[in-house]
Amino acid sequence: MVFYHFGRYIRLLKSSFSPPENYRMYWKELTDEMVSMGIGSLGIVAVVSVSFGAVMAVQTAYQLTSDLIPKSLIATITRDSSILELSPTIGCLILTGRIGSRIASQIGTMRVTEQIDALEIMGINSPAYLILPKLISGITMIPLLVIISMFLSIMGGLVACSASGVLSTQSYLQTITEGFIPFMLTVGLIKSFIFAFIMTTVAAYQGFYVRGGALEVGESSTRAMVVSCIMILVADYLVAQILL
């Protein structure tokens, strides 16, 4: 059963990577998707990221009970956790709830209302028209959102430290610039690129092959979120094992 779905998933991806019949139509679809994914997700990314950083700083400060451990370690842990794990992995898991479910329900609704059949009758490659713009938007906009999330998460830690008086603003800013390893940023961006690919293609697969009515569309949306989250967590472990 697993190999059956994997084979259909690979075949659908192969059908998606084909030259567009109408570049203007594809460009409009691509820009709409980029606006929806990027601008539409900016609010939730900002709120969640600032919360991530603030909570991480407060919890780290709570655990540093020994006077022998410098308080500046709070900034270092907040920075490294935000870049390596919080923004790329937790951020993408949250985005799966918005972007993945939207893709699955959108394509699934087109399937059950026979709009996809109509596209194929008109000679349009429906996988390429429906999935490729979403995939390109995902692998470009989600890494950008992750970069914004990294910055906001670190700033959230700064606000929490300053507000609680645990670490001064000057010490926090000085610490996050010291000992920074640029490779951590590379790992975070590689993760976000892989997670964006998983999120968009799994959701598109679940929506494209849905059968039935509105109830099945809702189930496919939920299934897309669950499968995407599991695959993202597995990929997170593999990337960490290979690159770190």
Image (cartoon, rainbow, N blue to C red):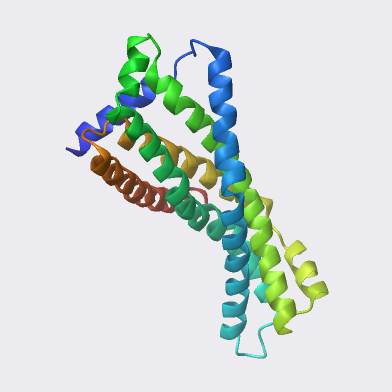
- At a point 67% along the width and 91% down the height, the residue shown is 67
- At a point 45% along the width and 21% down the height, the residue shown is 129
Work out whether 93 lies above or below 16. below
Q: Residue 219: horizontal and vertical position, in percent?
A: 27, 46
Q: Residue 192: horizontal and vertical position, in percent?
A: 53, 46
Q: Residue 113: horizontal and vertical position, in percent?
A: 30, 28
Q: Residue 45: horizontal and vertical position, in percent?
A: 58, 55
- Do we see residue 241 in this rendering? no
Q: Indicate the quadrant containing the N terminus: top left, top right, bottom left or bottom right.
A: top left
From the viewer's side, name the closer residue of 94 and 56. Answer: 94
Q: Is residue 99 left or right of residue 81?
A: left
- At a point 43% along the width and 28% down the height, the residue shown is 131
| Occupied quadrant, residue 101 | top left
| Occupied quadrant, residue 14 | top left
From the viewer's side, name the closer residue of 204 and 78. Answer: 204
- Do we see residue 106 in this rendering? yes
Tell which residue pokes out farthest to the right in this image: 170
